[in-house]
Amino acid sequence: MPLSLTLASRNLFQDRLRLVATLVGIVFSVVLVMVQLGLYVGFGRMVTTMIDHAPADLWIVTKGVKSFEDVSLLDTNIRDKVQAINGVSEVVPVVIGFSVWRLPNGGMTPVFVVGSDLKADGLRPWHLVGGSLQALSSPGAVAIDRFYYKRLGVDGIGATSAIRGQPITVEAVTSGIRSFTTTPYIFCNIDQARSYIGLPASKSSHFLVRVKSGADIGRVRDEIQATVSNVDVLTPSQFRERSRSFWLFGTGAGAALFAGALLGIIVGTVIVAQTLYSSTKDHLLEFATLRAIGGSKGYIYKVIVYQALLNAAIGFALASVVAIAVVGLTAQSALPVVITSSLVIGLLALTIAMCVGSAIVAILRVVRIDPVMVLAR
Amino acid sequence: MSAPIIEAKNISKRLGSGSAQVLALKHVDLSLGSGNLTVLMGPSGSGKTTLLSILGCMLAPTEGTVRICGRATAGLGHEQLAEIRRQHIGFVFQSYHLFPTLTAAENVQMALDVRGEIGAVARRKTKEALVRVGLEPKSGAFPRELSGGEQQRVAIARAVVADPSVILADEPTGALDGVNGQAVMAILSGIAKERNHAVLVVTHDTRLLRFADNILHIEDGVLKREEGANANVLRMRSIA
């Protein structure tokens, strides 16, 4: 180990109380940033979950639609026009909309209905843990997520209720299909979905388009856009981006998360800067000695930066333990904190930058050090 | 006669400003050659530390020139002066100024580390320096575990480990009792003779004069050399 690193680590561990205070500050800061950005990632994934699971090469949506959940109407005859375009393999309508579910006590709770042509490989429920997709073809059959049993007043396959006054039976159960709006998703056949929402057969919400193998998706998209008026034709990634942009920034939710993260960075930087400065001040005579025996400014900066890096490494390791616990605790919540590997790498870089940046204040103090002080004492 | 290691000519130094300004050094000429231990004596406030600071490239003179191993220090920046200290000067301080969180060996090795000397060679030189001051058995001890005399010996080892041309010692026995003070001076004297270093010891302890090859006296910023019979008388008094 380099002697400069030895000096840095020994000085750091010499004052344990200050070290603990520094680490608490770093852990608080990093966990806050981690949770905020983890929520951002989790939220970003949640708002695109339907788009992620839809078997589509292109989406046809009403012009200006902001997200998958943005309820709007398209004429169903669009399907025939698009189907006639060279390179299009299949066009599958999707119907979405809010409705009401009758509870056992006679009350009502809102639900978000997602209906699609199940035989044509439309937007079908995934992660099935009970029942079957085939059973959803039966009249009144719906699929719900088991997380919403209590909310919907049911207890599994075979449970009955009513949507908009029409009797339904739970024929399939999924796991992990959660709505960030907290309104449960109900999957069913498209015709039933129309009746639950109150839509005529001539209307659909979106269309999933699958292109033929080898067809140029960009060309097909342009042709659909030219053929059908008042629609947006989007690739899944474009639709994802539009949905994220709306929910995260159009609503201010993302800005709030980023503001929290920024606050964490500021708090962490101030705490580390303050403790590094006071530590440097306590060891000024040692730094003056280093200077007197010929140590360059660079050598002294190295000692301080090593201290900052040690703070960063220990603080990040401790914060990671806390973050893992937070991820575990929120995994089953309405809005899970999602920590990806790229987020971990980014946060490590941010922690290092924060701690090293904090060292600047201490370095500015050492820049003015006069080695003569060692002769005067 | 070999070229002087440190050569100061017509050094003057003003300290303070305005009406509080004082002339701490007045036209000082000084030359330190290898193999000699020079003792610089004088009362408090006489300019000893100011002169040592200038010779040690920590302070710039108001007037005059200083040459270290032939290199003029005038106009050099802080980093260049640090480089001269690194290459040519070893310091011994009154309060030792050891790093409290480093062991004796690590304290000594620090003088090599700042020079970029690391690894096995640095460890060997460190060991040799500690052997020279008789502290190799305590190389793993921290400063708080060492007596004052031992700490000063570690400081001497740190000063000599990189084999500098000159050792500047500021009151090296000031914090030590008589026995330890004499022992430290004996080591410094031995280093001057055996290693052919120039050693300048600033002190006000006349008991140390018997180790001196040259005696300098400074008072009110004016330096004068004690020579001939006067110097011998001073040495005899210190032995007595």
Image (cartoon, rainbow, N blue to C red):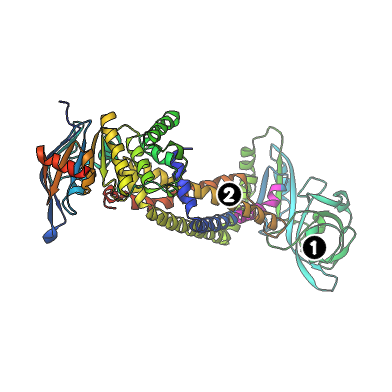
x, y (%) of residue B236? 18, 41
Whether residue A50 appears in magenta in the rendering, the answer is yes
Mark 1 against mark 2, which lies toward the viewer?
Answer: 2
Q: Is residue B131 above or below residue A139?
A: above
Say which mark, if any, is on residue A8. none
Element assignment for label 2: helix
Q: Would you name the residue on which mark 1 appears?
A: A196
User: Which residue is found at the position 54% from the left and 58% from the top?
Assistant: A24
Taking A365 as reference, is B199 left or right?
left
Q: Residues within 10 Å of mark 2 (few under 14, many from 20)?
A: some
Q: Would you name the residue on which mark 2 appears?
A: A317
Q: Which sits in the foreground, A332 or A292?
A: A292
Q: Chain of mark 2?
A: A
Query: Which SS does the magenta portion mostly show?
Result: helix
Span of residues in magenta: A38-52
Q: Which sits in the foreground, B173 or A69?
A: B173
Residue B212: quadrant of the picture: top left
Report whether residue A346 is seen.
yes
Taking B192 as reference, is B47 left or right?
left
